[in-house]
Image (tube, coloured by chain):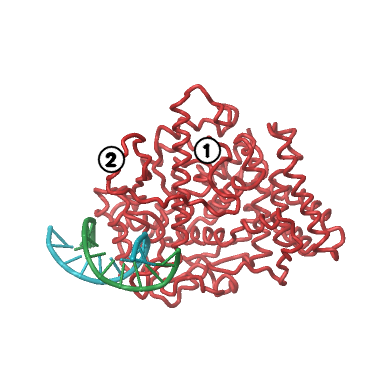
Chain colours: A red, B cyan, C green
Amino acid sequence: MHEEAASMSNLDASYLFSPGGGGGGVLPGGGVDMGPSYQLTGPATSLTTGDLPDTKDGIEELCPVCGDKVSGYHYGLLTCESCKGFFKRTVQNKKVYTCVAERSCHIDKTQRKRCPFCRFQKCLEVGMKLEAVRADRMRGGRNKFGPMYKRDRARKLQMMRQRQLAAQTLRGSLGDSSMYSSQPGTSPFANIHIKQEIQIPQVSSLTSSPDSSPSPIAVALGQVNSQLAQPASSQQPTLQIVGVPGGGGPHTSMIMGPENKLWGSANSATTSPHSLSPKAFQFDTVVPGGSAPPSSKMSPLIRDFVQAIDDREWQNLLYGLLQSQTYNQCEVDLFELMCKVLDQNLFSQVDWARNSIFFKDLKVDDQMKLLQHSWSDMLVLDHIHQRMHNNLPDETTLHNGQKFDLLNLGLLGVPTLADHFNDITAKLQELKFDISDYICVKFLLLLNPAFLDVRGITNRKHVQEGYEQVQQALLQYTISCYPEVQDKFNKMLQLLPEIHSLAARGEEHLYHKHCNGSAPTQTLLMEMLHAKKK
DNA sequence: ATTCAAGGCCAG
DNA sequence: CTGGCCTTGAAT
């Protein structure tokens, strides 16, 4: 595992962007066109279809834990049969292993038996889900991960198609770059195509959950060939696998402190009754004060925007990450953890953008420029949204007992910005800032025309038009739905610079940390910071 | 009726 | 303890 990690050190965010620009297969509504359901590695029967070597059912993936052949989705992701069994036994029987070496044993097919400690560690690192092991041992049926598996399959299928397309184009005309929208060498993201095609990436998950394995944007935007490993977990001094959190009872609060009302105890109706623990993270997309926007008065544009929001996924990702990062740890570096969460959120932003109207039609170069400029604004805005509309608490108790300051995420790690942040939030609250406003504002941040000139956007016109359309829609919306809020539209827009300045300070701070070497490297986050400084 | 991920079984 | 194969059963 270490070797691979080393060879990947030249991570550049280019892997995020696929050659094909925005014309992917993800449907606007967020629904994904599944096409023929993809089968896992049909038992090599594919020989009949002579040409197209491995495209058929393609994706013959390897187990992210040991590299053996995958047998299906198990406990959250595609793994081999043996790791499935191992994970199950470990969790069910609350096994406690110890590592006789440095807790960083290399796990592969031939050596996986040698160190169960490291094997289990790796299971968690790649995102196998404890809660998918059933406390009651009930057999059969489906669990809450079903839909996730489905989405994951769809993504992989899509990714495969893209890869195929790209490969064909490459084969067809090597000199012809018209297919690719980015000009090699013009941006830090540029040198992508060849790399992608040549080494068929063995994807390993960024963090956890099949939804992020390979992390969402990476798939949506192209593919991944980097393993954003988690060095953290391997170097804690005094660790052992502490009893596996099994047993149904007290685990609602495994991650969340009991103080998290909405997050902790809310409905778990959608969760399988058999699943063993943190159903905790399901939560309603509650709009406090019942301010659910009257969809009748909403423009179709905004309605689509709102429908595409998937906060639940966001939360699952967040908690999945917090869980996997702390499961087996006495104490983790909270700043580092925060960076990881930010990084993951950033991935989500990119993913969202890539599938969004206006943005998705842009050339990759333009997309990158817009994102480079707006990512931190969007992170801040999203945090505001999560707090305001989904009751995201400001703090949560990690699995290992540490307190994790969630608010810090919105401050990009700068505690002193809390006042500013709260100030902005309060102002928005006064304006009855709702989910529709949020999503529109997010578009405005992304398509912000203020920087078109500076940043050399090619398709300026398209961006401008998108911006204006959203602006119009938002204006209409505020007027018709919130006539009682004086000048809501303008007041909201006036807050954008404030968000931006907050975000800019956050970026600055992160950049410093990065230069000090105290922030994790090889993250999209740092990549973004870096890109801007150039 | 079919799928397919979860649990169970048991030879090695 | 491992891991390949078998049985289950909710979701589709």
Q: In the figure, residue B8 lies in which quadrant?
A: bottom left
Q: Is residue A339 left or right of residue A104?
A: right
Q: In the displayed image of the protein, which residue is found farthest to the bottom?
A: A249
Q: Position of residue A464 (x, y in %)?
A: 75, 40
**Which residue is disc 1 drawn over?**
A18
Q: Identify which residue is drawn at 67% across, 60% down.
A: A385
**Which residue bears the numbered disc 2?**
A47
Q: Dividing the picture into quarters, in which one does residue A137 lie? A: bottom left
Q: Is residue A348 left or right of residue A46?
A: right
Element at label 1:
loop
Q: Are marks 2 and 1 in contact (CB under 8 Å)?
A: no
In the depicted structure, whether residue A186 falls above or below residue A117: above
Q: Chain of mark 1?
A: A
Residue A458 sits above or below residue A162 on the image? above
> Label 2 is placed on what type of residue?
Leu
For this rendering, which residue is in front, A58 or A457? A58
Does the image show residue A107?
no
What chain letter is assigned to the residue under label 2? A
**Which residue is found at the position 44% from the left and 40% from the top?**
A225
Q: CA distance from mark 2 to mark 1?
A: 29 Å
Q: As rendered, which of A314 and A358 lies closer to the eye?
A: A358
Amino acid at dot 1: Ser
State which mark lies toward you, 2 or 1: 2
